[in-house]
Image (cartoon, rainbow, N blue to C red):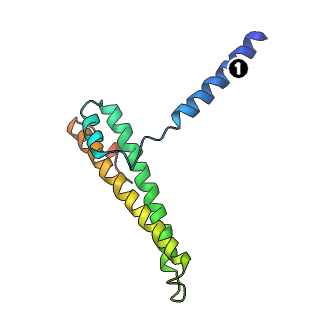
């Protein structure tokens, strides 16, 4: 009975630890380009694929967010065009577009090196 309890406890701790450590965000729109260019030279095909996928997922997510906010901006009436709400939405849209561009730029570095090493680009394609 004690063995079962200890085994279950160990399993719970292992799952929680993996969840915490596994949640680290790989894709960072603020990571310096030069740093990425240096790092990719030492990365394995698997590491390149993992990083490229992380950026591809963020690109897809940001595209969706940009679309939603852009629709909200389009829906602003002429009366509200100069309102604080409109300014906030435009600012939010600008920030999202900037992030999207940063993710795409960083993604390209990983994807190019991945392809150079013979990786299947279909595995990291932005959907």
Helix, strand or loop at label 1? It is helix
Q: Quadrant of the N terminus?
A: top right
In the current view of this chain or complex, which residue is farthest to the left? Answer: 116
| Residue at x 70%, y 20% (from the top left corner) | 9
Q: Residues within 10 Å of mark 1 (few under 14, many from 20)?
A: few
Q: Is residue 71 above or below residue 29?
A: below
55 and 97: which one is in front? 97
Residue 72: percent from the left, percent from the top? 52, 74
Q: How many marks?
A: 1
Residue 81: percent from the left, percent from the top? 50, 84
**Can the viewer see residue 67?**
no
Q: Quadrant of the C terminus?
A: bottom left
Quadrant in the picture for residue 60 = bottom left
Q: Is residue 69 above or below residue 81?
A: above
Q: Is residue 31 left or right of residue 68?
A: left
Q: Is residue 17 left or right of residue 105?
A: right
Mark 1, residue position: 8
| Residue at x 46%, y 72% (from the top left corner) | 90
In the current view of this chain or complex, which residue is farthest to the right? Answer: 1
69 and 118: which one is in front? 69
**Can the viewer see residue 101?**
yes
Quadrant in the picture for residue 27 = top left
Q: Is residue 61 above or below residue 14?
A: below
Q: Is residue 41 above or below residue 110?
A: above
| Residue at x 77%, y 10% (from the top left corner) | 2
| Residue at x 47%, y 41% (from the top left corner) | 25
Residue 102: percent from the left, percent from the top? 35, 54
Q: Is residue 92 left or right of residue 107?
A: right
Quadrant in the picture for residue 37 = top left
């Amino acid at each position: 009975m004690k063995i079962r309890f200890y085994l279950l406890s160990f399993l719970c701790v292992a799952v929680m630890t993996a969840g915490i450590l596994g949640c680290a965000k790989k894709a960072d729109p603020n990571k310096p380009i030069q740093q990425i260019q240096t790092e990719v030279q030492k990365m394995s095909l698997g590491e390149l694929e993992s990083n490229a996928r992380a950026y591809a997922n963020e690109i897809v997510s940001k595209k969706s967010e940009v679309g939603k906010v852009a629709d909200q901006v389009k829906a602003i009436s002429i009366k509200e065009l100069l309102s604080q709400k409109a300014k906030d939405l435009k600012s939010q849209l600008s920030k999202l577009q900037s992030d999207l561009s940063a993710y795409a730029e960083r993604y390209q570095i990983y994807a190019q090196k991945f392809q150079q090493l013979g990786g299947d680009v279909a595995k990291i394609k932005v959907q």
